[in-house]
Amino acid sequence: MSVCPAVPNAKRIVYSTCSIHKEEDEEVVMKALESPEAVEYGWTIAPRSQVLPKWERRGRVEATNGDAGECTTLASLNTD
C-alpha cells in the first residue's frame, strides 16, 4: 500500500471501484489493511455505523476477515 507514506496524516481513505469482483473490491481493502504500512499507522476499516449505515447492500463477508464485509457497501445498477 504505497499511499501510506505519501499521506501519513490521512484520517480516512475511501476506496471505490466499478467492479463486481471481490478480487478488485473487498480483497484489495483487506490486503491494504494487512500491509506493513497500514499496520504501522494503525489503520482499520471503519465500522458500519460510519459507512452509509442505512445502505442495505453490504460487502461479501466471505471475502473479508470476519465481519468486515458489513463495513463495505455494494451497489447494483439495476436495483440501487
Image (cartoon, rainbow, N blue to C red):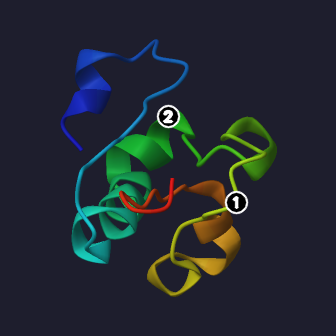
For mark 2, does the 10 Å Cα neighbourhood hold few (<14), some (14 to 19), or many (20 or more) residues?
A: some
User: Disc 1 marks which residue?
Assistant: 56
Report the residue at 49% width, 34% height from top: 41
Q: Are marks 1 and 2 in contact (CB under 8 Å)?
A: no
Counting from the top left corner in percent of width and height, residue 57 is at: 61, 63
| Above/below status of 8 relative to 27 | above
Judge left or right: residue 53 versus residue 79.
right
Mark 1 element type: loop
Q: In the rendered structure, which amino acid carries the disc numbered 2?
A: Tyr
Extreme residue toward the front, this view: 78
Nearer mark to the viewer, of 1 and 2 = 1
User: Disc 2 marks which residue?
Assistant: 41
Distance Cα–Cα, label 1 vs label 2? 30 Å
Task: Name the residue nearer the viewer: 8 or 27.
Answer: 27
How many numbered tags mark residues here?
Answer: 2
Task: Name the residue nearer the viewer: 18 or 10.
Answer: 18
Q: Which mark is residue 68?
A: none
For mark 1, does the 10 Å Cα neighbourhood hold few (<14), some (14 to 19), or many (20 or more) residues?
A: few
| Above/below status of 15 relative to 31 | above
Task: Name the residue nearer the viewer: 79 or 5.
Answer: 79
For the N terminus, which image quadrant? top left
Report the residue at 42% width, 33% height from top: 14
Judge left or right: residue 15 versus residue 23.
right
Report the residue at 36% width, 57% height from top: 77
Judge left or right: residue 1 versus residue 73.
left
| Above/below status of 41 relative to 54 | above
| Above/below status of 3 relative to 53 | above
Counting from the top left corner in percent of width and height, residue 23 is at: 24, 73
Q: In the rendered structure, which amino acid carries the disc numbered 1?
A: Glu
Counting from the top left corner in percent of width and height, residue 73 is at: 54, 55
Task: Name the residue nearer the viewer: 11 or 35.
Answer: 11
Mark 2 element type: helix
